[in-house]
Amino acid sequence: MVAGETSGDLLASHLISALSARLPDTRFFGIGGPRMQSAGFDAWWPCERLAVHGYVDALKRYRELSAMRKALLARLLKAPPDLFIAVDAPDFNLWLERRLRDRGIPTVHFVSPSIWAWRGGRIKGIGRAVTHMLCLFPFEPALYENAGIPASYVGHPLADVFPLVPDRGAARERLHLHENALVVALLPGSRESEVRNLAATYIAAARLLTERHPGVTLLVPLATRETRLLFEQALYDAGAPDLPLRILFGHAVDAMTAADMVLVASGTASLEAALLKRPMVISYRMGKWQYRLMKRMAYLPWVGLPNILCRDTVVPELLQDDATPEALANALDRWLADADARAALVQRFTDLHLELRQNTAQRAADVVLSYLPGAGGRGAA
Protein backbone atom coordinates (compact mmCIF):
# COMPACT_ATOMS: atom_id res chain seq x y z
CA MET A 1 0.00 0.00 0.00
CA VAL A 2 1.08 3.56 -0.65
CA ALA A 3 -0.84 6.41 0.98
CA GLY A 4 -0.09 10.10 0.62
CA GLU A 5 -0.65 12.75 3.29
CA THR A 6 -2.85 12.66 6.38
CA SER A 7 -6.16 12.04 4.60
CA GLY A 8 -4.74 8.98 2.79
CA ASP A 9 -3.34 7.64 6.04
CA LEU A 10 -6.79 7.82 7.66
CA LEU A 11 -8.57 6.28 4.68
CA ALA A 12 -6.07 3.44 4.41
CA SER A 13 -6.19 2.69 8.14
CA HIS A 14 -9.94 2.01 7.95
CA LEU A 15 -9.41 -0.31 4.97
CA ILE A 16 -6.60 -2.18 6.74
CA SER A 17 -8.84 -2.73 9.76
CA ALA A 18 -11.70 -4.01 7.59
CA LEU A 19 -9.41 -6.38 5.69
CA SER A 20 -7.62 -7.62 8.81
CA ALA A 21 -10.95 -8.55 10.40
CA ARG A 22 -11.70 -10.84 7.46
CA LEU A 23 -8.16 -12.04 6.65
CA PRO A 24 -6.23 -11.88 9.95
CA ASP A 25 -2.95 -13.17 8.49
CA THR A 26 -2.68 -10.47 5.81
CA ARG A 27 0.54 -8.39 5.83
CA PHE A 28 0.40 -4.73 4.85
CA PHE A 29 3.54 -2.78 3.96
CA GLY A 30 4.84 0.12 1.86
CA ILE A 31 4.42 3.86 2.46
CA GLY A 32 2.02 4.95 5.18
CA GLY A 33 1.39 7.04 8.26
CA PRO A 34 0.81 6.63 12.00
CA ARG A 35 -2.86 5.61 11.73
CA MET A 36 -1.95 2.85 9.27
CA GLN A 37 0.85 1.72 11.57
CA SER A 38 -1.58 1.56 14.49
CA ALA A 39 -3.72 -0.76 12.35
CA GLY A 40 -0.77 -3.10 11.76
CA PHE A 41 0.97 -1.54 8.74
CA ASP A 42 4.73 -1.88 8.20
CA ALA A 43 5.81 1.57 6.97
CA TRP A 44 8.99 1.37 4.92
CA TRP A 45 8.74 5.14 4.41
CA PRO A 46 6.44 7.64 6.19
CA CYS A 47 3.60 9.06 4.11
CA GLU A 48 4.67 12.61 5.01
CA ARG A 49 7.51 12.17 2.51
CA LEU A 50 4.91 12.29 -0.30
CA ALA A 51 3.33 15.59 0.79
CA VAL A 52 3.96 18.31 -1.81
CA HIS A 53 2.32 21.72 -2.01
CA GLY A 54 1.80 22.90 -5.57
CA TYR A 55 3.84 22.65 -8.74
CA VAL A 56 6.90 24.48 -7.45
CA ASP A 57 7.34 22.22 -4.43
CA ALA A 58 6.75 19.14 -6.62
CA LEU A 59 9.50 20.24 -9.02
CA LYS A 60 11.93 20.98 -6.19
CA ARG A 61 11.43 17.52 -4.71
CA TYR A 62 11.17 15.56 -7.96
CA ARG A 63 14.55 13.82 -7.67
CA GLU A 64 13.93 12.82 -4.05
CA LEU A 65 10.46 11.42 -4.77
CA SER A 66 11.56 9.72 -7.98
CA ALA A 67 14.40 7.95 -6.16
CA MET A 68 12.07 6.76 -3.41
CA ARG A 69 9.54 5.48 -5.95
CA LYS A 70 12.20 3.54 -7.88
CA ALA A 71 13.53 2.04 -4.66
CA LEU A 72 10.03 0.95 -3.69
CA LEU A 73 9.40 -0.57 -7.12
CA ALA A 74 12.64 -2.57 -6.99
CA ARG A 75 11.77 -3.90 -3.56
CA LEU A 76 8.25 -4.91 -4.62
CA LEU A 77 9.44 -6.62 -7.79
CA LYS A 78 12.03 -8.58 -5.82
CA ALA A 79 9.31 -9.97 -3.51
CA PRO A 80 6.00 -9.41 -5.33
CA PRO A 81 2.91 -8.80 -3.21
CA ASP A 82 -0.45 -10.41 -3.99
CA LEU A 83 -1.99 -6.97 -4.48
CA PHE A 84 -0.98 -3.33 -4.58
CA ILE A 85 -3.36 -0.69 -3.15
CA ALA A 86 -2.71 2.94 -4.00
CA VAL A 87 -4.47 5.41 -1.72
CA ASP A 88 -4.78 8.76 -3.50
CA ALA A 89 -1.39 10.40 -4.43
CA PRO A 90 -1.99 9.75 -8.16
CA ASP A 91 1.11 11.57 -9.41
CA PHE A 92 3.27 9.21 -7.38
CA ASN A 93 1.17 6.05 -7.56
CA LEU A 94 0.04 5.74 -11.18
CA TRP A 95 3.64 5.40 -12.43
CA LEU A 96 4.18 2.67 -9.86
CA GLU A 97 0.88 0.91 -10.56
CA ARG A 98 1.51 0.66 -14.29
CA ARG A 99 4.85 -1.08 -13.79
CA LEU A 100 3.48 -3.44 -11.15
CA ARG A 101 0.47 -4.32 -13.28
CA ASP A 102 2.76 -5.03 -16.23
CA ARG A 103 4.42 -7.66 -14.00
CA GLY A 104 1.07 -9.33 -13.25
CA ILE A 105 0.38 -7.69 -9.88
CA PRO A 106 -3.24 -6.43 -9.64
CA THR A 107 -3.59 -2.79 -8.60
CA VAL A 108 -6.51 -1.19 -6.78
CA HIS A 109 -6.59 2.61 -6.66
CA PHE A 110 -8.54 4.06 -3.72
CA VAL A 111 -9.83 7.60 -4.41
CA SER A 112 -10.39 8.61 -8.00
CA PRO A 113 -8.24 11.44 -9.32
CA SER A 114 -10.48 14.43 -10.09
CA ILE A 115 -10.67 13.72 -13.82
CA TRP A 116 -14.19 15.22 -13.72
CA ALA A 117 -12.72 18.59 -12.70
CA TRP A 118 -9.60 18.88 -14.85
CA ARG A 119 -7.00 16.86 -16.82
CA GLY A 120 -9.59 14.34 -18.02
CA GLY A 121 -7.06 12.96 -20.51
CA ARG A 122 -5.43 11.15 -17.59
CA ILE A 123 -8.05 8.42 -17.85
CA LYS A 124 -6.06 6.68 -20.61
CA GLY A 125 -3.02 6.39 -18.37
CA ILE A 126 -5.23 5.31 -15.48
CA GLY A 127 -6.62 2.48 -17.64
CA ARG A 128 -3.10 1.17 -18.26
CA ALA A 129 -2.16 1.37 -14.58
CA VAL A 130 -5.25 0.48 -12.55
CA THR A 131 -6.97 -2.89 -12.32
CA HIS A 132 -9.89 -1.49 -10.30
CA MET A 133 -10.82 2.04 -9.21
CA LEU A 134 -12.57 2.69 -5.88
CA CYS A 135 -14.64 5.88 -6.09
CA LEU A 136 -15.75 8.09 -3.22
CA PHE A 137 -18.41 9.98 -5.19
CA PRO A 138 -21.47 8.47 -6.91
CA PHE A 139 -20.98 10.08 -10.33
CA GLU A 140 -17.42 8.77 -10.79
CA PRO A 141 -17.82 5.05 -11.68
CA ALA A 142 -19.67 5.81 -14.94
CA LEU A 143 -16.67 7.84 -16.17
CA TYR A 144 -14.40 4.83 -15.74
CA GLU A 145 -16.84 2.24 -16.99
CA ASN A 146 -17.26 4.26 -20.21
CA ALA A 147 -13.49 3.96 -20.65
CA GLY A 148 -13.53 0.21 -19.94
CA ILE A 149 -12.00 0.52 -16.44
CA PRO A 150 -13.65 -1.51 -13.64
CA ALA A 151 -14.82 0.87 -10.92
CA SER A 152 -16.96 0.73 -7.78
CA TYR A 153 -18.68 3.42 -5.74
CA VAL A 154 -17.80 2.92 -2.08
CA GLY A 155 -19.02 6.20 -0.56
CA HIS A 156 -17.03 8.66 1.51
CA PRO A 157 -15.63 7.57 4.90
CA LEU A 158 -16.39 10.92 6.52
CA ALA A 159 -20.10 10.28 5.91
CA ASP A 160 -19.80 7.09 7.95
CA VAL A 161 -18.01 8.84 10.80
CA PHE A 162 -20.02 12.05 11.10
CA PRO A 163 -23.49 11.88 12.71
CA LEU A 164 -26.47 12.83 10.57
CA VAL A 165 -27.48 15.39 13.21
CA PRO A 166 -24.40 17.08 14.69
CA ASP A 167 -24.56 17.96 18.39
CA ARG A 168 -23.82 21.67 18.34
CA GLY A 169 -24.56 22.07 22.06
CA ALA A 170 -21.98 19.44 23.01
CA ALA A 171 -19.37 21.00 20.72
CA ARG A 172 -19.96 24.41 22.29
CA GLU A 173 -19.65 22.91 25.73
CA ARG A 174 -16.32 21.28 24.81
CA LEU A 175 -15.05 24.63 23.53
CA HIS A 176 -16.51 26.58 26.48
CA LEU A 177 -18.81 28.67 24.30
CA HIS A 178 -22.13 30.18 25.41
CA GLU A 179 -25.07 28.40 23.82
CA ASN A 180 -26.49 31.67 22.42
CA ALA A 181 -23.22 33.21 21.22
CA LEU A 182 -22.74 34.11 17.55
CA VAL A 183 -19.84 31.89 16.47
CA VAL A 184 -17.95 31.96 13.16
CA ALA A 185 -15.26 29.39 12.31
CA LEU A 186 -12.42 30.50 10.02
CA LEU A 187 -10.46 27.71 8.32
CA PRO A 188 -7.71 29.16 6.10
CA GLY A 189 -6.38 25.72 5.09
CA SER A 190 -4.28 22.86 6.41
CA ARG A 191 -1.22 23.58 4.27
CA GLU A 192 1.33 26.29 4.88
CA SER A 193 0.89 27.68 1.36
CA GLU A 194 -2.88 28.01 1.88
CA VAL A 195 -2.45 29.85 5.17
CA ARG A 196 0.11 32.18 3.61
CA ASN A 197 -2.30 33.04 0.81
CA LEU A 198 -5.46 33.44 2.93
CA ALA A 199 -4.48 34.50 6.45
CA ALA A 200 -4.36 38.27 5.86
CA THR A 201 -7.68 38.23 3.99
CA TYR A 202 -9.37 36.16 6.70
CA ILE A 203 -8.05 38.46 9.41
CA ALA A 204 -9.38 41.53 7.58
CA ALA A 205 -12.75 39.82 7.12
CA ALA A 206 -12.73 38.93 10.83
CA ARG A 207 -12.16 42.58 11.68
CA LEU A 208 -15.23 43.54 9.64
CA LEU A 209 -17.32 40.89 11.37
CA THR A 210 -16.32 42.12 14.83
CA GLU A 211 -17.25 45.68 13.83
CA ARG A 212 -20.64 44.57 12.54
CA HIS A 213 -21.35 42.05 15.31
CA PRO A 214 -19.80 43.10 18.62
CA GLY A 215 -19.37 40.05 20.81
CA VAL A 216 -18.98 37.59 17.93
CA THR A 217 -16.73 34.63 18.73
CA LEU A 218 -14.20 33.78 16.01
CA LEU A 219 -12.59 30.33 16.04
CA VAL A 220 -9.49 29.54 13.96
CA PRO A 221 -8.53 25.85 14.09
CA LEU A 222 -5.06 25.22 12.65
CA ALA A 223 -3.63 21.80 11.90
CA THR A 224 0.07 22.22 12.64
CA ARG A 225 2.54 24.30 14.62
CA GLU A 226 3.82 25.79 11.35
CA THR A 227 0.40 26.97 10.18
CA ARG A 228 -0.30 28.43 13.62
CA LEU A 229 2.95 30.42 13.53
CA LEU A 230 2.09 31.70 10.06
CA PHE A 231 -1.34 32.85 11.18
CA GLU A 232 0.02 34.51 14.32
CA GLN A 233 2.59 36.35 12.18
CA ALA A 234 -0.22 37.53 9.88
CA LEU A 235 -2.10 38.83 12.93
CA TYR A 236 0.98 40.77 13.99
CA ASP A 237 1.56 42.14 10.47
CA ALA A 238 -2.08 43.28 10.32
CA GLY A 239 -1.75 45.12 13.63
CA ALA A 240 -4.54 42.96 15.01
CA PRO A 241 -3.13 41.13 18.04
CA ASP A 242 -6.20 42.17 20.08
CA LEU A 243 -8.73 40.85 17.57
CA PRO A 244 -11.04 38.47 19.51
CA LEU A 245 -9.87 35.33 17.72
CA ARG A 246 -9.47 31.99 19.45
CA ILE A 247 -6.75 30.00 17.73
CA LEU A 248 -7.22 26.26 18.26
CA PHE A 249 -4.66 23.54 17.73
CA GLY A 250 -6.73 21.09 15.72
CA HIS A 251 -10.38 20.74 16.80
CA ALA A 252 -11.58 21.75 13.33
CA VAL A 253 -14.63 19.48 13.48
CA ASP A 254 -15.61 20.82 16.92
CA ALA A 255 -15.13 24.40 15.71
CA MET A 256 -17.31 23.88 12.63
CA THR A 257 -19.96 21.97 14.59
CA ALA A 258 -20.17 24.77 17.14
CA ALA A 259 -20.22 27.55 14.54
CA ASP A 260 -23.22 29.37 13.12
CA MET A 261 -21.26 29.92 9.89
CA VAL A 262 -17.97 28.77 8.40
CA LEU A 263 -15.44 30.55 6.19
CA VAL A 264 -13.34 27.78 4.67
CA ALA A 265 -10.60 27.23 2.12
CA SER A 266 -11.67 24.92 -0.69
CA GLY A 267 -10.75 21.33 0.05
CA THR A 268 -11.79 18.44 2.27
CA ALA A 269 -12.74 20.84 5.08
CA SER A 270 -15.57 22.18 2.92
CA LEU A 271 -16.98 18.64 2.62
CA GLU A 272 -16.66 18.27 6.40
CA ALA A 273 -18.62 21.50 6.84
CA ALA A 274 -21.32 20.15 4.52
CA LEU A 275 -21.59 16.89 6.47
CA LEU A 276 -21.87 19.01 9.63
CA LYS A 277 -24.74 20.90 7.92
CA ARG A 278 -23.08 24.29 8.31
CA PRO A 279 -23.74 27.40 6.17
CA MET A 280 -20.41 28.30 4.64
CA VAL A 281 -18.50 30.51 2.26
CA ILE A 282 -15.75 28.80 0.27
CA SER A 283 -12.67 30.76 -0.73
CA TYR A 284 -9.25 30.11 -2.23
CA ARG A 285 -6.15 31.96 -3.37
CA MET A 286 -3.04 30.73 -5.15
CA GLY A 287 -0.31 32.12 -7.37
CA LYS A 288 -1.63 34.04 -10.38
CA TRP A 289 0.14 31.81 -12.91
CA GLN A 290 -1.09 28.61 -11.25
CA TYR A 291 -4.65 29.95 -10.97
CA ARG A 292 -4.78 30.90 -14.66
CA LEU A 293 -3.48 27.48 -15.66
CA MET A 294 -5.95 25.56 -13.51
CA LYS A 295 -8.87 27.77 -14.52
CA ARG A 296 -8.09 27.15 -18.18
CA MET A 297 -8.00 23.39 -17.61
CA ALA A 298 -11.10 23.16 -15.41
CA TYR A 299 -14.33 21.54 -16.64
CA LEU A 300 -16.77 22.52 -13.90
CA PRO A 301 -18.16 25.90 -12.80
CA TRP A 302 -17.36 25.07 -9.15
CA VAL A 303 -14.26 24.26 -7.11
CA GLY A 304 -15.91 23.47 -3.76
CA LEU A 305 -16.88 19.85 -3.10
CA PRO A 306 -20.33 20.73 -1.67
CA ASN A 307 -21.28 22.48 -4.91
CA ILE A 308 -19.69 19.82 -7.11
CA LEU A 309 -21.54 17.02 -5.32
CA CYS A 310 -24.85 18.86 -5.27
CA ARG A 311 -24.34 19.92 -8.91
CA ASP A 312 -25.53 23.38 -7.91
CA THR A 313 -24.22 26.56 -6.30
CA VAL A 314 -25.62 25.80 -2.86
CA VAL A 315 -22.90 27.83 -1.09
CA PRO A 316 -20.98 30.86 -2.41
CA GLU A 317 -17.48 30.50 -3.79
CA LEU A 318 -15.21 33.55 -3.73
CA LEU A 319 -11.90 32.82 -5.40
CA GLN A 320 -8.67 34.66 -6.09
CA ASP A 321 -9.32 38.42 -6.61
CA ASP A 322 -13.00 38.00 -5.69
CA ALA A 323 -12.01 36.82 -2.22
CA THR A 324 -11.82 40.30 -0.68
CA PRO A 325 -12.42 40.81 3.04
CA GLU A 326 -15.60 42.77 2.40
CA ALA A 327 -16.99 40.19 -0.05
CA LEU A 328 -16.31 37.36 2.41
CA ALA A 329 -17.89 39.22 5.33
CA ASN A 330 -20.92 40.17 3.22
CA ALA A 331 -21.44 36.57 2.10
CA LEU A 332 -21.35 35.37 5.70
CA ASP A 333 -23.82 38.07 6.69
CA ARG A 334 -26.25 36.94 4.00
CA TRP A 335 -26.40 33.51 5.62
CA LEU A 336 -26.98 35.13 9.00
CA ALA A 337 -29.89 37.17 7.66
CA ASP A 338 -31.72 34.34 5.84
CA ALA A 339 -33.12 31.64 8.14
CA ASP A 340 -35.06 29.99 5.30
CA ALA A 341 -31.88 29.60 3.23
CA ARG A 342 -30.10 28.05 6.20
CA ALA A 343 -32.93 25.55 6.75
CA ALA A 344 -32.98 24.59 3.05
CA LEU A 345 -29.21 24.08 3.13
CA VAL A 346 -29.48 21.71 6.11
CA GLN A 347 -31.94 19.55 4.15
CA ARG A 348 -29.74 19.59 1.04
CA PHE A 349 -26.69 18.57 3.02
CA THR A 350 -28.62 15.85 4.86
CA ASP A 351 -29.61 14.31 1.52
CA LEU A 352 -25.96 14.49 0.41
CA HIS A 353 -24.81 12.87 3.67
CA LEU A 354 -27.18 9.93 3.16
CA GLU A 355 -25.97 9.48 -0.41
CA LEU A 356 -22.31 9.37 0.68
CA ARG A 357 -22.89 7.10 3.70
CA GLN A 358 -22.11 3.65 2.25
CA ASN A 359 -19.98 1.85 4.89
CA THR A 360 -16.93 2.73 2.83
CA ALA A 361 -14.30 0.51 4.45
CA GLN A 362 -16.41 -2.64 4.09
CA ARG A 363 -17.37 -1.87 0.49
CA ALA A 364 -13.75 -1.23 -0.40
CA ALA A 365 -12.70 -4.43 1.38
CA ASP A 366 -15.22 -6.42 -0.67
CA VAL A 367 -13.54 -5.27 -3.89
CA VAL A 368 -10.02 -5.86 -2.58
CA LEU A 369 -10.88 -9.37 -1.43
CA SER A 370 -12.13 -10.24 -4.91
CA TYR A 371 -8.54 -9.79 -6.16
CA LEU A 372 -6.83 -11.80 -3.43
CA PRO A 373 -6.34 -15.49 -4.26
CA GLY A 374 -6.28 -16.44 -0.58
CA ALA A 375 -9.77 -14.99 -0.21
CA GLY A 376 -11.16 -16.83 -3.20
CA GLY A 377 -10.62 -13.93 -5.57
CA ARG A 378 -9.13 -13.73 -9.04
CA GLY A 379 -5.61 -12.88 -7.93
CA ALA A 380 -3.23 -11.68 -10.59
CA ALA A 381 -5.34 -13.30 -13.32
Image: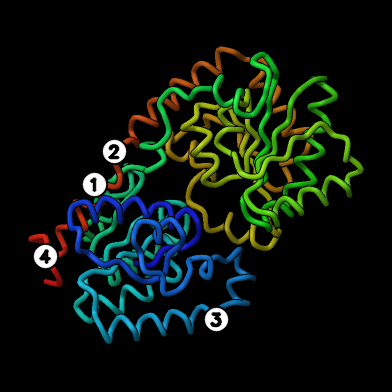
Residue 58's spot in the image, x, y percent?
Answer: 58, 72
In depth, the one of 296 and 104 nearer the eye is 104
Query: Image quadrant for the N terminus?
Result: bottom left
Quadrant the C terminus occupies: bottom left
Q: Residue furthest left?
A: 376
Q: Is 130 positioned to the left or the right of 71 in the image?
A: left
Tell me the residue that label 3 is attached to: 64
Identify the residue at horizontal 43%, vertical 55% (top origin): 35
Return the residue at label 2: 358
**Relative to 203, is 180 on the left or the right?**
left
The answer to which image quadrant residue 263 occupies is top right
Q: Earlier in the sequence, mark 1 or mark 4?
A: 1
Say above or below: 236 vs 335: below
Q: Which residue is mark 4?
A: 374
In this view of the protein, which residue sits in the foreground, 307 or 370?
370
Asked whether the residues under the numbered discs 1 and 2 touch, taking CB atoms below 8 Å apart as contact, a structural biologist would say yes
Q: Are marks 1 and 4 in contact (CB under 8 Å)?
A: no
Rounded to the nearest angstrom, the CA distance separating label 3 from label 4 is 36 Å
Identified at 35% across, 82% down, the residue is 73
The amino acid on which the numbered mark 1 sits, given as a three-letter code, is Arg
Q: Amino acid at mark 4?
A: Gly
Local secondary structure at mark 3 = helix
Residue sitting nearer the eye, 283 or 276: 276
The answer to whether the residues at label 1 and label 3 have Cβ atoms under 8 Å apart is no
Residue 363 shows which numbered tag?
1
Query: How far apart in space, not on screen, are marks 1 and 2 (Cα)?
Result: 7 Å
Q: CA distance from mark 2 to mark 4?
A: 26 Å
Residue 15 x %, y %: 31, 53
Element type at mark 2: loop
